[in-house]
Image (cartoon, rainbow, N blue to C red):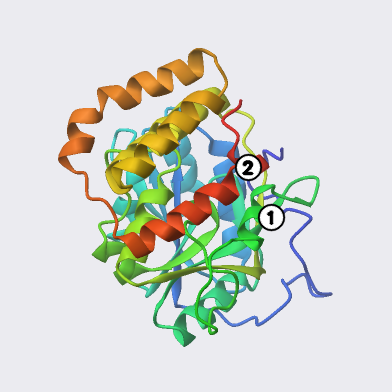
Amino acid sequence: MPHDPSHVPATTPRNDTGTPHGDLHPDPRTTVVVITRDRRPELLRTLRTLRDLPERPEVVVTDNGSTDGTADAVTRHFPEVRLLCPGRNLGAVGRNLAVRHVRTPYVAFCDDDTWWEPGSLRRAADLLDAHPRLAAVTARIVVEPSGEEDPVVAELRESPLTGPDWLPGPALGSFLAAATVMRVDTFRAVGGFHPGLWLGGEEELLATDLLRRGHWLSYVPELTIHHAASQVRDSTERRVLGLRNTLWFTWLRRPWPSALRRTWYLMRTVPRDHASLRAFARAAAGLPWVLKQRDPVPADLEARLVALEEARRTSPARKYVG
């Protein structure tokens, strides 16, 4: 993985003048929000690619308590970036903090190990402009350096949900924060990412609350984001958090028959190891606040969640391994 902050990935398309292909005029409609913690080389690479985009988006970075010099490096190399330093690790709620500073109608979420392809932010804004009931569009994810599609793309492309004819792609029941452009006012209206979930599969609860309000989510394959997974990520801890949050979401929003069925399914199918045990223990410890905030979805939305649940059982992107 490149560690040079001036490096531009070879996957960024360019014309003969060295400028990214597509409309070369800046597009003021979208701000990019990035959360990071102790991944300075990856973040600097991502910020370089964002600065080189033809859209020239504003960028807001929330540094979740890094101790590796991230904040100083961003200030030194990217003075145009708005840097927020809450002094502790807010997890996904760091995005909520960043969105408070956004003044554009749309926000593009981006992780410190992902970068948007030139033209994708402009096209996403065009689609959101054209369809007021469309809350968010999720891009095709390309894994680097192999150039292959992320396994989750097949799940997005083959979504079992149906939607109105005007949707620019398959209707979705959730989204991927590292690859999604969303309406800022809609994000704020539902409260952003729930602080109780912190990080790890935190999108599912937000997406369900958006659907509950009559908004639509869509996968749009003509949008592309690249992902070079950080080499310093703790995949086991992320699995623990993802499974814990899946259980919490299930108990927060699913009717009891579905919640019990899904919990039992997970108990039978997740790896029988210490990580899974920790996830269930942490989920059980959170039951008091989860039950206090429990608010099951209505029957029509539950039917969509059931369809998604069945489709995900065969998805290679939904295995709690690592």
Q: Position of residue 289 (x, y in %)?
A: 19, 34
List the single residue furthest toward the top: 274
Q: For mark 2, does the 10 Å Cα neighbourhood hold few (<14), some (14 to 19), or many (20 or more) residues?
A: some
**Residue occupying the point 38% across, 43% down:** 258
Front position in the image: 222 or 243: 243
- Look at the numbered disc 2 and give the secondary structure of its residue: helix
Circle 1 Cα neighbour tier, 10 Å, few/some/many (<14 / 14–19 / ≥20): some
Check disc 1 and report the residue beneath it. Answer: 154
Q: Is residue 129 above or below residue 141?
A: below
Residue lying furthest front in this view?
257
- Residue 57, position in %: x, y? 50, 69
315 on left or right of 29: right
Question: What is the C-alpha distance between the residues marked 1 and 2?
Answer: 9 Å
- Residue at x 30%, y 23% (from the top left corner): 284
**Left or right of 156 in this view: 135:** left
Residue 58 appearing in the image: yes
- Residue behind mark 2: 317
Name the quadrant of the N terminus. top right
Which residue is depicted at the point 30% across and 48% down? 253
